[in-house]
Amino acid sequence: MKKIKYKKIKEILEKNSLEVKSKISDEEIFLNLKTISNSSKNDLSFFSNIRYLNDLKKIKAKACLIEEKFINYLPDNCYPIIVMDPYLALAFISNLFSDEIFQSNGIISSNTSVDSKSKIEKNVQINSFTTIFHNTEIKENSYIGSNSSIGPNVIINKNVVIHDNVSISNAIIMDNCIIKSGARIGGAGFGFEMKTKQKINHSGNVIIGKNSSIGSNTTIDRAVFDSTIVGEFSNIDNLVQIAHNVNIGDFAVIAAQVGIAGSTKIGNYVKIGGQTGISGHLVIGDNVSIAGKSGVTKNISSNAIIAGFPAKDIKLWKREIIRNSLRK
């Protein structure tokens, strides 16, 4: 069991420019990070959603990350740790309490096959039954799990974590990315001439921007000629399909079971709800939010919030839902 001092928590938050106020001693120890309803006397918790206000009044944790305007709801047994954004603070400190931290130990398993034409830099960990193919470069401090297939034509940059049963070919993975189990990156896309069904050869690649995360069993196809791109600081959930030539901007959030057809261009700071389908050759602007189960068939301008099938402005969609329900 980990014992985390408040001093360490405060250091991480302040390092990330979060102002922290609390009367807790720097030497005070926390054993776990828990939700409000499941916390106990040695735990740290957080309050970030008004719907849990009644639970906050009964919290048993030693301390709680909380906005100053809510501290009067805390019982006497729980110290407030006052921050502007408790959920952001939670994100920064969550790794402190995790037992599942993947950091390279610098060991390449004897059960791993590494092609002589690949290049492995210092402090790279590669676990059992993984194969590294030719023309592959893995840079320092990267971690690769078991039963994975890396290459050919792959560059894995610094501090990348690749979990078990992943296959990556024809791709560049930038610094600090996380690729979760079962992901398939860089295979040929769904391309052929429609009348004869003649396959189209794919010679492009995939580029994953730095600090991005690719979910389990997500597939990202290589481009026909250039690059399929996922931007920096993007989070792609499990079971997502990203087709050839798709270009996704920075800070994207894409939930599970989304399908994006080929050659669609998506801007920065886009949020896409689960089970959404997006047609090919579209342009979707910056700061767009797409509700779950939407069907996007037309270009979407920046800052739009859309829903439904075919997807439209969410206010219009809601009015149509109400009108249709009244007809029944």
Image (cartoon, rainbow, N blue to C red):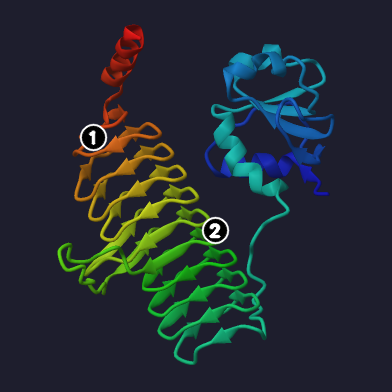
- Which numbered circle lies on residue 302? 1
Q: Is residue 242 left or right of residue 32?
A: left
Q: Residue at x 72, y 41 (%)?
A: 7
Residue 196 rendering spot, x and y as whole percentages: 16, 68
Disc 2 is placed on an element classified as loop
Q: Is residue 234 left or right of residue 202?
A: right
Neighbor class of circle 2 (other Cα within 10 Å; few <14, some 14-19, many 20+) is many
Q: Nearer the viewer, residue 316 or 157?
A: 316
2 vs 1, front mark: 2
Residue 33 rendering spot, x and y as whole percentages: 72, 38
Which quadrant holds the C terminus? top left
Given the current orientation, which residue lies at the most extreme bottom position? 116
- Which numbered circle lies on residue 180? 2
Residue 250 visible (yes or no): no
Residue 54 visible (yes or no): yes
Name the residue type under label 2. Answer: Lys
